[in-house]
Image (cartoon, rainbow, N blue to C red):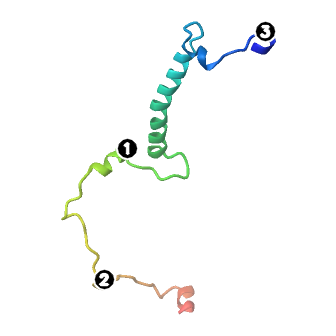
Amino acid sequence: MGFYQGTVGMRWKNLNDHDNGMKEVLIIMAVEWLIILPGAYYLDQVVSLGSGIRRHPLFFLDHMRKKSKQSIRRPSLKRQSSKVEVEMEKADVAQEV
């Protein structure tokens, strides 16, 4: 637009010019990014709108919690019992065996 009017247009040195307000616009945009970007990330993590894992609303506090030594379970090498029952009365199950 400045080319058609015979001027050079907006330059970085014109940023402090109070008539155009460009400095204020850039400050507002930076502040908006600092506020909206973390808010959008939070909503993306908490609200599940499809194929995502929904997290607890206070998920960001998880790293602040200290796990006590009692809550940490050590893996056990003991054999665990299993209670699986198969019904053999059905004809299709009996044929598979």
Of residue 56 and residue 5, the one placed in the foreground of this image is: 5
Task: Looking at the image, tell me whether mark 2 or mark 1 is earlier in sequence order.
Answer: 1
- Residue at image position (57%, 16%) is 15
User: How many labels were placed on the picture?
Assistant: 3
- Residue at image position (37%, 43%) is 57
Quarter of the image that includes the N terminus: top right
Task: Looking at the image, tell me whether mark 3 or mark 1 is earlier in sequence order.
Answer: 3
- Residue at image position (44%, 41%) is 42
For disc 3, the neighbor class at 10 Å (few under 14, some 14 to 19, many from 20) is few
Please state which of the two labelled residues, at mark 2 or mark 3, is closer to the viewer.
Answer: 3
x, y (%) of residue 38?
45, 37
Task: Looking at the image, tell me whether mark 2 or mark 3 is earlier in sequence order.
Answer: 3
* Disc marking residue 80: 2
* 3D distance between C-alphas at marks 3 and 1: 54 Å
Q: Would residue 26 appear left or right of 70 to someone viewing this image?
A: right
The three-letter amino acid code for the residue at tag 3 is Gln
* 3D distance between C-alphas at marks 2 and 3: 84 Å
For disc 1, the neighbor class at 10 Å (few under 14, some 14 to 19, many from 20) is few
